Image: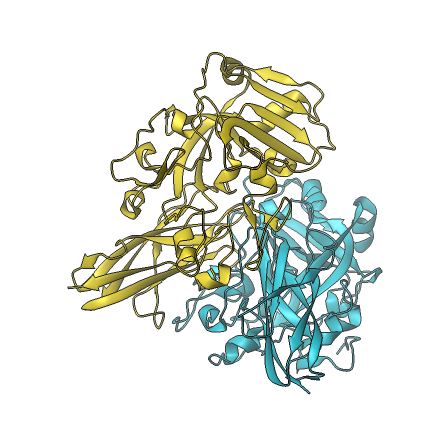
Chain colours: A cyan, B yellow
Amino acid sequence: MISPAKRDDMLVHQSEPYNAEPPRGALADDVVTPIAAFYGRNHGTFPDTDAATWRLCVGGMVDRPLELSLDDLRSRFTRHEEIATLQCAGNRRAGLMAVHDIPGQHPWGPGATSTARWAGARLADVLDAAGLDPAATDIAFDAPDVADEADPPQGFGGSIGVGKATAGEVLLAWEMNGEPLPVAHGAPVRVVVPGHIGARSVKWVETITARDRPSDNFFQATAYRLLPADTKDPGPGDGVALGAVALNSEILRPDDGDEVPAGPTAVTGYAFAGEDRTIIRVDVSADGGDTWVQADLDEQLGPWTWRLWHATVDVPAGRTTITARAWDSSAALQPEHPASVWNPKGYVNNSWPAVTVTGR
Amino acid sequence: MISPAKRDDMLVHQSEPYNAEPPRGALADDVVTPIAAFYGRNHGTFPDTDAATWRLCVGGMVDRPLELSLDDLRSRFTRHEEIATLQCAGNRRAGLMAVHDIPGQHPWGPGATSTARWAGARLADVLDAAGLDPAATDIAFDAPDVADEADPPQGFGGSIGVGKATAGEVLLAWEMNGEPLPVAHGAPVRVVVPGHIGARSVKWVETITARDRPSDNFFQATAYRLLPADTKDPGPGDGVALGAVALNSEILRPDDGDEVPAGPTAVTGYAFAGEDRTIIRVDVSADGGDTWVQADLDEQLGPWTWRLWHATVDVPAGRTTITARAWDSSAALQPEHPASVWNPKGYVNNSWPAVTVTGR
């Protein structure tokens, strides 16, 4: 078993397969998250892949199927960098579980979201080299990390639309924050799909298949789908497959339950919206929403990154709930209540975040 | 004064300049709205333009400034069709005014949204013919319909980003629903910017200017901006310019205040999201949100159109409020309450729609 090199204070939901998130404050200081704090979300054991013998097979609806070594990938294609935030679809699930239980799922807090500087080859360039059939509509990824929770057990996989796959920002990455990609994050090579839920950024990718329909993999066809609240026994194709990341935000500091000196209190958090959306405004309230202050937004490092934000609110003595809310570049606001977005698998909790603190 | 050819039952907020919307039910039967029902939103008097002498001037940061007649536009550029929904940023403002008054603004209901089949030249092709400077970042439109409300009084105008302007879907349209574009909708030629607020689809356009910053026109720099609720005296550049249309929905039938037979009741509405978002789900509740039924979604005619939807809910005897809520393709949900989105100019009310009916 390979141990991920992580902070000692990671909140470990499961050690095998490894599922862990950093404490809120660990995300507050850096737009680019240190690898040691970057969340880990896995459905299977890390595969023990030998980079020297690893091969990437590109096939399906292509003119020239490819089999590429890591050296081939590095030497035949231009290296490209992208700073991208990944967000697990289950991020903030704990807020939904507080409304109504979600058995069999990890109670992720706000830390299943992190940002890294990725480098690798553009998927678009690799597909171009393979001669993509114009009739292909979906590009599927498959990896060897077998997940027992899948029905039947199978390696993790998923797919994205061909438009996204050829748009240029999707990488086959072998570097993370300037270092060789760690095994815990998909070495030797992982997919990075900026703007989409983390599940589409398949780690340890071995097979890329051009298709005329979405992947049949369990994690595309059955899991990672938005189901109506009253769904009883979901099967393949029920609900809607998740793709682009919904507008979301969280408070990172102070932490929920903190004691703070009464008076002006600095609040820091993140806000993120997938695909063509950016964050244009974040409001913070310490009086239950009667009054709001606008947060200062840090620079957005690129089109695929979150924005960290900062505000100062007045915390009185006693217990106070601090709430935040974000708007995206279409002037759409997050929904207020977790009960409104509750769903049976506990995905996409993008309701207004809140932490309760005690002023002393 | 030119009279628009509209239904007799239009809800006329102002006759001069002409501002009117159809009753809810008039939008419920057709994905493509009849011209007679299509809303009219104007800041000035319809200009009395002679199509024979009209010229479109394309200039600013271009290599070859153009002066095009209507014949030039028709003969030099390929005719292109696009079905696109236009939505006024003030659509559903009445719901915000019920929370807190918004002086000096029309109380638009849900009818400031309509869909037409537009045809004309692609703006991208015209900009290509003019030789767009790669340093240009914004494309500005100006028209001769002088608005006294502007400070100082000026013709209506606005701008869009160069990426949107060259993406192919933006038209310089001379046809609407297969007929010559009516004067009330911008004849001889108007801009149609699918996915953006209606204000960017400048009618009676005469000047297109490539720039390195957004338009200085009053309706870009000062109006049509999202301001924080506590803004006192907004000036140019305050708040955030509106562009892409936020996720929104409305109930079209039954109408608010209708009497209906108690029992199963058919509900019809629209849902719409701008730019790269589509509608994936609409829920309807007749019990205050305790239970929801999923609406059937009509086919989406194209990437730039609303979806009409249909559901059947059980209406008991007495007064009942029917509520709806829509999700976009990022699995983002509309915010619940109009108070959450209230803003001083009354734009982008995308809170959950509701109508109250009486079961008999």
Q: Quadrant of residue A33?
A: bottom right
Task: Please give left or right for residue A244 compared with residue A304 in the image.
Answer: left
Question: Which image quadrant: the C terminus of chain A?
Answer: bottom right
Q: Residue at x 68, y 84 (%)?
A: A258
Q: Position of residue A266 (x, y in %)?
A: 72, 72
Q: Is residue A205 visible?
A: no
Q: Residue at x 42, y 61 (%)?
A: B99
Looking at the picture, tell me which residue is in the foreground, B312 or A3: B312
Location of residue B71 with respect to B4 vertically, above or below: above
Q: Quadrant of residue A287?
A: bottom right
Looking at the picture, tell me which residue is in the foreground, B266 or B6: B6
Q: Position of residue B65 (x, y in %)?
A: 66, 19
Q: Position of residue B303 (x, y in %)?
A: 48, 42
Q: Is residue A184 visible?
A: yes
Question: Which image quadrant: the N terminus of chain A?
Answer: bottom right
Looking at the picture, tell me which residue is in the foreground, B300 or B203: B203
Task: Please give left or right for residue A19 compared with residue B141 in the image.
Answer: right
Q: How many marks?
A: 0
Looking at the picture, tell me which residue is in the foreground, A39 or A128: A39
Location of residue A82 with respect to B198 vertically, above or below: below
